[in-house]
Image (tube, rainbow, N blue to C red):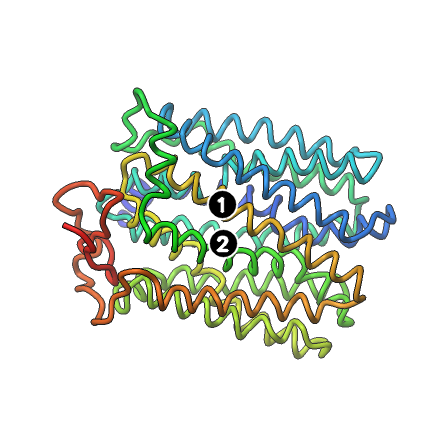
Amino acid sequence: MSGAVAALRRWWEVTLLGILTVGAYGLVMYSFGVLIGPIHEATGWPVGGLSLAYTLSSLLGGLAAPFSGWLLDRFGPRPVLGGSLVLGSAGLFAAASAPSLATFVVAWGIGGGIVAAGLYYSVTMAITARLFVEQRLRAFAVLTFIGGLASVIFFPVAGLLVEQLSWRTALRVLVVLMALHCIPAALLVRRGRSMAGGRVEFRKGVGEALRLPEARWMIVMFALASLALSAVQVHQVPAMTAAGLSLGAATTIASVKGFLSLPGRAGTEVVVRRVGVPAALGTAYAAMAVGTVPLAVSGGLGAALAFMVVTGFAFGTISPLQGLFAADVYGERRLGTRMGVQTLIVSLVAATGPVVLGVAVDATGGYRAGVLASAALSAVALVMLVTRPGRRSQPAADPSASDSPSSGAATSSSFDSNRLPGFRRERK
């Protein structure tokens, strides 16, 4: 009992950030995939047009992410988290009352974009990296394990709500649930020790994020992987219903897939200590490439279960592994701004995934081509990871060093082998 109390005292802030993540992703990312079918049936609005709302929220979230990161560097987490929650919820409430497709797209795009810019991992990982400099690997595992409950909770809850209520009422209830998840962290999480406030130069932080070849290569790799992930994530439920599954069965499978991601997140620390971040991330990309293919097969339940199992374990590891990879590349100085710039570029690319897949569905009447293309993009990301600049050919670094702070804060000009296994210092 005393051990549990000590753990809670140690990890309470990252726990609150994880709960916040559940609410933010649970509504804006996961619930949208459940709502899109009932909204289409109730209003007649085309799937491609509805997908544009998700795309707009991703685009606006990406565009605003560098500014959110700068605010985080300048003022700390509370104004960013609280302001994003209030403004984002207002936009999503407006979407629930939208009289037309255009109004819905704009309202969801703005509301979801604010949530994405201020409450997604680009912000919460930056906060966590600064709060737990010496135990970053463990803290990221806690953050993303709790955050992984977003799909487990919101897929079935959203499915139940839209079956019992109108989609408009269901959306309003979901916004309230999101707020309840986010309020504790917005009120209580403190600055990290590296987040000292004062003058922060926005333009310089943006330039530093793009200066290194390693960083540019990494951003393109993340963008392609996220393009595939966003397309499949938004359309997995309607793809399964198009293959003959009921909405209840499809949301259950999607929820179980989210549940299966939890062991992956929980095991991230162990895997990274054994093989290093790059090898672990490559394995996840490979699993996503292979596991997405069954979703393109009109095989009903069997294909859906294969998709669920193969991608379920891997999906949960991608966010923490990419976050660890990026945090080590960028270092702690102006980390919020740098990760915001990364999020901007990745979001601009990834946001096209759902709408392109949705337009393809409207044009071809099926999901096969779009889903296979998504699998191919995951494979391309894997190739980029293997051929990245400065790729390490020898075995991973000593795992015992992964939680040890380096002799100085990591800078944007080097990987730090003392921070994460699997990286080596590229420059002196």
- Residue 74 figure quarter: top left
The residues tagged by marks 2 and 1 sit, at their Cα atoms, a distance apart of 7 Å
Instruction: Give percent across and percent down for residue 261.
Output: 49, 62
The total number of labels drawn is: 2
User: As drawn, is 45 to the left or to the right of 196?
Assistant: right
Q: Give the residue drawn at x 16%, y 47%.
A: 406
176 relative position to 396: left or right:
right
Q: Is residue 13 visible?
A: no
What numbered label is drawn on residue 305?
Answer: none
Q: Give x and y (percent) for residue 389.
A: 31, 60
Q: Which mark is residue 345?
A: 1
Whole-percent x and y of residue 171? 72, 41
Mark 2 — residue? 223
Instruction: Please state which of residues 98 and 413 is positioned toward the viewer in this rendering.
Output: 413
**What's under tag 1, amino acid-wise?**
Ile
User: Would you identify the image quadrant in which residue 385 lies?
Assistant: bottom left
User: Do the numbered discs 2 and 1 sit on residues whose CB atoms are within 8 Å?
Assistant: yes
Q: Is residue 129 visible?
A: yes
Give, as a three-letter code, the residue at label 2. Answer: Ala
- Which comes sooner in the sequence, label 2 or label 1? 2
- At a point 53% along the width and 68% down the height, the residue shown is 311
Query: Above or below — where is 288 with respect to 210?
Result: below
Depicted 7 relative to depicted 255: above or below: above
SS category of the residue bearing label 1 = helix
Say whether residue 127 is left or right of residue 171: left
